[in-house]
Image (cartoon, rainbow, N blue to C red):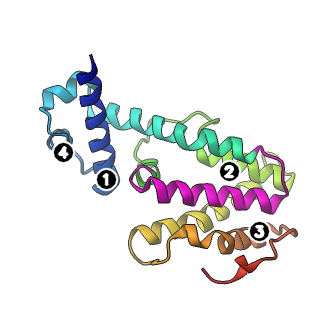
């Protein structure tokens, strides 16, 4: 009973790494089977297609990220404290699970016909949070602000991943938080050494 589950886990981890490093479109079933050291038939016993495998893994990994992230945003605290905790969570997740985080980041645009539930869609979570901060529910300004915030937070991860940013984003939490607070015009900015360059 244990071996099929173990084999499935090996397949899934191999697929996540390939999707994260090679890309969804350029990864084929043969690549995954070779990386997992299984036959293509063994892979098809668990999943009907590469797309089914990728979407299943994406939903699982998104849930693992967004459930605790959503809970964090509901905690008591000032706007800047919540923003700092959110940035810290994202960068810690990236530091601890870089391949899984990259998989989530790079694969999200690879499913044109699929949609995530609003409760677990990172974009919707951020938009709702920013709307509440700005007290502008369902307002396009809040959507624009959420897009700017996501760019500020995610681009250091992208640039670190491609080697352009040599400092790990986890060491830039305070600086990124301060930038986000300035964009959102949050007045309770953290007055700490965090305003210094990372």
User: Is the residue 31 above or below the residue 115 in the image?
Assistant: below
Reading the chain from its start, which is encountered first: label 3 or label 4? Answer: 4
Q: Residue at x 66, y 65 (%)?
A: 148
Q: Nearer the viewer, mark 1 or mark 4?
A: 4
Q: Residue at x 18, y 45 (%)?
A: 35
Question: How many residues crowd mark 3 within 10 Å: few (<14), some (14–19), many (20+)?
Answer: many
Q: Which mark is residue 35?
A: 4
Where disc 1 sits, the SS reads loop
Reading the chain from its start, which is encountered first: label 1 or label 2? Answer: 1
Q: Which residue is at the far front?
A: 2
Total marks shown come to 4
Question: How many residues crowd mark 1 within 10 Å: few (<14), some (14–19), many (20+)?
Answer: some
Q: Which residue is at the far left?
A: 39
Residues at badges 2 and 4 in contact (C-beta under 8 Å)? no
Q: Nearer the viewer, mark 3 or mark 4?
A: 4
Q: Which residue is mark 1?
A: 23
Q: Which residue is mark 3?
A: 181
């Amino acid at each position: 009973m244990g071996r099929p589950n173990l084999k499935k886990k090996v397949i899934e981890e191999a697929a996540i790494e390939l999707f994260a490093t090679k890309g969804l479109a350029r990864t084929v079933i043969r690549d995954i089977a070779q990386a997992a050291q299984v036959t293509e038939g063994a892979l098809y016993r668990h999943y009907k297609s590469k797309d089914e495998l990728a979407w299943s893994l994406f939903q699982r990994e998104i849930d693992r990220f967004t459930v605790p992230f959503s809970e964090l945003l509901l905690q008591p605290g000032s706007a800047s404290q919540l923003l700092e905790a959110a940035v810290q969570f994202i960068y810690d997740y990236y530091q601890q699970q870089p391949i899984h985080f990259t998989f989530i980041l790079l694969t999200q645009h690879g499913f044109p016909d699929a949609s995530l539930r609003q409760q677990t869609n990172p974009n919707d979570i951020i938009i709702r949070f920013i709307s509440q901060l700005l007290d502008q529910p369902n307002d396009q300004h809040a959507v624009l602000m959420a897009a700017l915030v996501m760019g500020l937070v995610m681009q250091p991860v992208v640039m670190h991943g491609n080697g352009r940013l040599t400092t790990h984003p986890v060491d830039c939490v305070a600086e990124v938080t301060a930038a986000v607070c300035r964009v959102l015009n949050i007045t309770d900015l953290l007055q700490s050494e965090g305003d210094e360059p990372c």
